[in-house]
Amino acid sequence: MKAHVYVWMKYTVLDPQGQTVCHALNSLGHKEVTSVRQGKYFEIDLADGTSKEKAAAALEEMARDVLSNPVIEEYRVEIGE
């Protein structure tokens, strides 16, 4: 089973890396870009036989406690087949 965890900065938090990317894109002629928010992506392989219920609970804990900083980031967990 494969899982995907997406992590991004809360919209109330400044994103200096996103601003830098936006500025770089604008300087390369991409004036249509007005804002960029950057984030992280994790692809996680789970052991065969892991139930979706157990995987969901474990991934929620991993995303909350290790993969993101809940003070400034939000996350989404997706579990594949």
Image: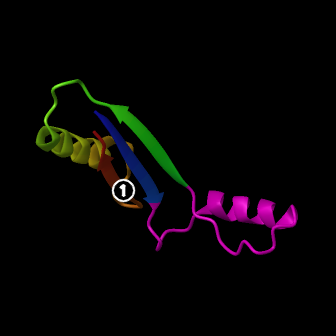
The percent coordinates of residue 14 (x first, y second) are: 55, 68
In the image, residue 3 sits, relative to residue 12, either above or below, namely: above
Q: Is residue 72 a member of the stretch shown in magenta?
A: no
Q: Amino acid at mark 1?
A: Tyr
From the viewer's side, name the closer residue of 18 and 80: 80
From the viewer's side, name the closer residue of 14 and 23: 23
Residue under the image location 57 percent in, 57 percent down = 38
Element carrying mark 1: strand
In the image, residue 61 sits, relative to residue 29, either above or below, namely: above
Quarter of the C terminus within the rendering: top left
Residue under the image location 28 percent in, 49 percent down = 64
- The residue most toward the front is 81
Quarter location, residue 70: bottom left
Q: Is residue 27 left or right of residue 2?
A: right
Q: Is residue 72 left or right of residue 26?
A: left
Q: Tell me how many marks there are.
A: 1
Neighbor class of circle 1 (other Cα within 10 Å; few <14, some 14-19, many 20+) is many
Q: Is residue 24 a member of the stretch shown in magenta?
A: yes
Quarter location, residue 53: top left
In the image, residue 69 sits, relative to residue 11, either above or below, namely: above
The percent coordinates of residue 4 (x first, y second) are: 37, 44
The percent coordinates of residue 26 (x first, y second) are: 81, 67
* Disc 1 target residue: 75
Quarter location, residue 2: top left
Q: Is residue 46 left or right of residue 23?
A: left
In the image, residue 2 sits, relative to residue 28, either above or below, namely: above
Residue under the image location 46 percent in, 74 percent down = 12
From the viewer's side, name the closer residue of 33 and 2: 2
Q: How is the image coloured?
A: rainbow
The span shown in magenta is 9-38
From the viewer's side, name the closer residue of 81 and 33: 81
Quarter of the N terminus within the rendering: top left
